[in-house]
Image: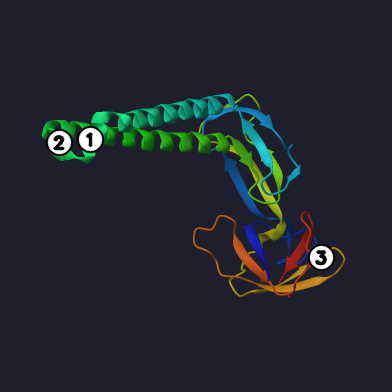
Amino acid sequence: MLAVALLAGCALRGASDSAVEAEVVPGVRWTLSFPVAGTLVSQRVAAGGRAAEGDPLAVLDPAPFEARVLDRSAALQAAEQRRVAGYMDPEALRTMLPSVVAPERFDALRVAVLQAELGVATAGLELRRAVLDNRAAVLRAPAAVQLRRWFAIEGAWLAAGAPVAEVVDASTVRVVMRAAPGWRPGTRVVAARADGTRLHGWVGPIQPGGIEGVPVMISESAALAVGERLRVFRP
């Protein structure tokens, strides 16, 4: 069944009082953003263009992210070298035999080894974060989509989470129309297509706080195309 969203409005000219105009629109929309801040250097798809799932849509300047990955990689290597040097120290090796090492020396060596281990773990975590941020600098399509519009232009500095683009999934559709006064949940309706085909349905339950209006369920399956216009009325 197909969900049809209703918006408050007026009836069609020349139609019955309950007839309203409707249009088939994409069923799913996303407003996309980068989870990291940076300068937008490339828009890979023009408004109106299509992209497959996973295709890059936009790219932030990669230089800062790549530099951070290199920096964190070097920090991890240094931490690992400090850990190796600590374990190879003869006194550190003797910590395995605390009975031959003064208690205060044993504690100091143990703390030094633990600090080296913590340094490696911390450096490794920071490197992983840098790698993830580097990947996040490429905005990818969440599904097979059509790019509806851009909110930013190339060269703009974008804060993390700022809207970048709006995309729609044209593989699913919904119908948006102007609701005639007096329609209630359960009201039977007919949706007439341009070729004269009629689809039957009913007004669905009103969703509290819904911003897109009242849904209508269409009982017949129909291959409706985005942009197609219908005339909906009560039989």
Residue under numbered circle 3 = 193
Amino acid residing under circle 2: Val
* Residue 64 higher or lower than 139, as above or below: above
* Residue 13 higher or lower than 90, as above or below: below
> Which residue occupies 47% across, 38% down?
128
Q: CA distance from mark 1 to mark 3?
A: 87 Å
Q: Is residue 21 left or right of residue 71?
A: right
Residue at the left extreme, as displayed: 103
**Mark 3 packing: few (<14 Cα in 10 Å), some, or many (20+)?**
some
In this rendered view, identify the residue nearer to me: 167 or 208.
167
In this rendered view, identify the residue nearer to me: 219 or 81.
81
Q: Is the N terminus in the top left, top right, bottom left or bottom right quadrant?
A: bottom right
Q: Which mark is residue 111?
A: none
> Which residue occupies 73% across, 59% down?
22
Disc 3 is placed on an element classified as loop
Residue under numbered circle 1 = 94
In this rendered view, identify the residue nearer to me: 61 or 182.
61
Badge 2 vs badge 1, beta-carbon distance below 8 Å: yes
Q: Position of residue 145 (x, y in %)?
A: 70, 49
Q: Is residue 186 left or right of residue 125?
A: right
